[in-house]
């Protein structure tokens, strides 16, 4: 039996902070923001909701975390829309060859 584990940061504020601090390639971080925000506008959803929905449609078990009550509702409001194949491809296109969109220092050495 094979097992796969997916780690993702769905919080759009995470990508904004990384871009502003230049912790990674700022252009890549802003590209993530642009794509997730553009797709979200089609559905009246946030970029974070698009990220979570993309993971669900990929078959991932998603456990979002938040300390804000208002985001609990937002995190659960991802089951009333479905991303089109083109939307999925647009988000898929954000990945780099190693499989990660942005490589962080604490990430496991799985690639």
Image (tube, rainbow, N blue to C red):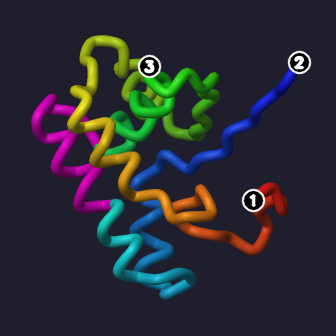
Q: In this view, does 55 lie above or below 103?
A: above
Q: Nearer the viewer, residue 35 or 71?
A: 35
Q: Which of 39 and 93 is in front in this view?
A: 93
Q: Is there a contact, CB below 8 Å, between mark 1 and mark 3?
A: no
Q: Nearer the viewer, residue 17 or 95?
A: 95
Q: Is the magenta stretch mostly helix, strand or loop?
A: helix
**Can you tell which mark lies on residue 111?**
1
Residue 38 is one of the magenta-drawn residues: yes
Q: Tag 3 or tag 1, which sits nearer the N-term? A: 3
* Direction left: furthest residue: 42
Q: Where is residue 80 in the image (x, y as percent from the top left)?
A: 27, 12
Of the two numbered discs 1 and 3 in the rendering, the one whose residue sits closer to the viewer: 1
> Which image quadrant for residue 67?
top right
- Which residue is denoted by mark 3 in the rendering? 76
User: What whole-number distance in Å separates the C-alpha atoms at marks 1 and 3?
Assistant: 30 Å
79 lies left or right of 3: left
Q: Position of residue 12 (x, y in %)?
A: 40, 54
| Rendered residue at 51%/62% (across/down) | 101
Residue 39 is one of the magenta-drawn residues: yes
User: What whole-number distance in Å separates the C-alpha atoms at marks 2 and 3?
Assistant: 30 Å
Magenta-drawn segment: 33-46
Q: Is there a contact, CB below 8 Å, between mark 1 and mark 2?
A: no
Neighbours of disc 1 within 10 Å: few (<14), some (14-19), many (20+): few
| Rendered residue at 55%/64% (across/down) | 97
Quadrant of the image containing the C terminus: bottom right
């Amino acid at each position: 039996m094979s097992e796969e584990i997916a780690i993702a940061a769905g919080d759009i504020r995470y990508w904004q902070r990384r871009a502003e601090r230049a912790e990674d390639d700022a252009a890549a971080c802003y590209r993530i923001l642009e794509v997730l925000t553009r797709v979200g506008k089609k559905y009246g959803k946030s970029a974070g909701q698009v990220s979570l929905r993309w993971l669900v449609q990929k078959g991932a078990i998603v456990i979002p975390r938040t300390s804000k009550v208002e985001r609990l509702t937002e995190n659960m409001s991802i089951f009333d829309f479905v991303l089109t194949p083109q939307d999925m491809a647009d988000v898929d296109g954000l990945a780099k060859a190693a499989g990660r969109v942005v490589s962080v220092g604490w990430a496991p050495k799985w690639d």
